[in-house]
Amino acid sequence: MSRSDLSIGAARRMALAAQGFADPAPSGRVDVRHFRRVLGRLVLLQLDSVQAVCRSHFLPVYSRLGPYDRAALDDWLWRSGEMFEAWAHEASVVPVALEPLLRWCRQRASEGETWAGLHAMATTQAAYVGQVLDEVGRNAPLLAGDLSDPRPRQGKWWGGRSDGRRALDWLFRVGDVGITRTGNFEKEFHPLSNLVPEEVRSLPTPGEHEAQRDLLERAARSHGVGTAADLADYFRLRLAEVRPRLAEMVEAGRLQEVSVEGWREPGFRHPEAVLPRRVDARGAREHPQLDGDLDDLVGDDDAATDPGPLELRVVPAPHQLGAVLPHVRLEVLDAVAGFFEV
């Protein structure tokens, strides 16, 4: 196996291009074609109900396309049949074609590899969880507040969530129900079969190692180049399981191992990753999984893939919007603020 070298500048340009920042800006009204292009690059959009600027899934699309109709994006994500909500990079929206590659994760969740409280509830209150599942089947789309027996609990934050909400979360984690979102981001629960088409659900279930390799290939395509930790984090895979999969992929020619200037660990480059001479980072503002709080463009403070001058921090205060959008001139910040409603 040979190892090629990349300068840190080349690695940054490669990552930005893989993330879609080298793609041409829309020449007219942004529509579903542009949303597909962005998700074709990113593969997923992380969701978060906590917002500092606006809903987290709006930010990466804005940073690549500019202003667009957020209701149109939400309608495409949850009503087109092309995407579905899944537990991937935390709660995320991903293409329905990815559903078979996530089945092993759901199987592990059903065996207890998820939040301990959810698994304990599913074990000790199995009859109630089954009742909730039956109710989703009869009344979908179903809001948690519409359950006939929500079983409220006392407590603060997550500790005060009703048994009904926890049962629905469990059923989502193990793949028995799926989620769409209302205009105010509230979850609507459906049988997963209502959201993922039969032609996808009927596909054979790949083995864990095969699924992990396929997920890592998609992560590498979206990164362009990254360390094992970078690629593992894209779908929240365990690094100890990822390292042997990456070795297999390098051996098979699905990835190229590279050394990158300044990185403490080897990098892995997707064979189709392009290296532009220059990237106009007019929109290089948000990380694909930006949660509106503290995520960086690529990697994190301790990552081997130090993004250097491309790092940014998102801050919630409106008067600090210039820190959130470092490439936007001050005279247009008012327009951006209006789009984000801050």
Image: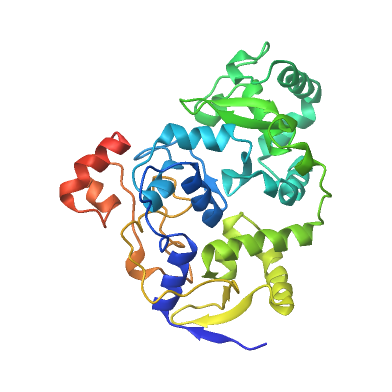
Residue ranking furthest to the front: 28
Residue appearing at x 78%, y 37% in the figure: 198
Q: Which quadrant: the C terminus?
A: top left
In the rendered image, the residue lying farthest to the left is: 331
Residue 194 image position (x, y, % from top left): 71, 29
Side (left or right) of 82 relative to 113: left
The residue positioned 59% from the left and 71% from the top of the image is: 270
Count of marks, rendered view:
0
* x and y percentages locating residue 119 in the rendered image: 73, 36
- Residue at the extreme top: 148
Location of residue 238 with respect to 334 vertically, above or below: below
> Residue reaching furthest bottom?
2
Of residues 275 and 147, which is closer to you in this image? 275
Q: Quadrant of residue 68?
A: top left
Query: Could one spot residue 49 in this view of the protein?
Result: no
Quadrant location, the N terminus = bottom right
Front one among 66 and 293:
66
Left or right of 140 in this view: 157:
left
Q: Position of residue 206 (x, y in %)?
A: 81, 54
Q: Residue at x 43, y 80 (%)?
A: 262
Q: Is residue 164 visible?
A: yes
Left or right: where 259 falls relative to 318: right
> Could you say where residue 135 lies in the image, as x and y percent from the top left?
73, 17
Q: In the picture, residue 230 is in which quadrant?
A: bottom right
Residue at figure coordinates x 64%, y 28% from the top left = 166
Name the residue nearer the viewer: 297 or 76.
Answer: 76
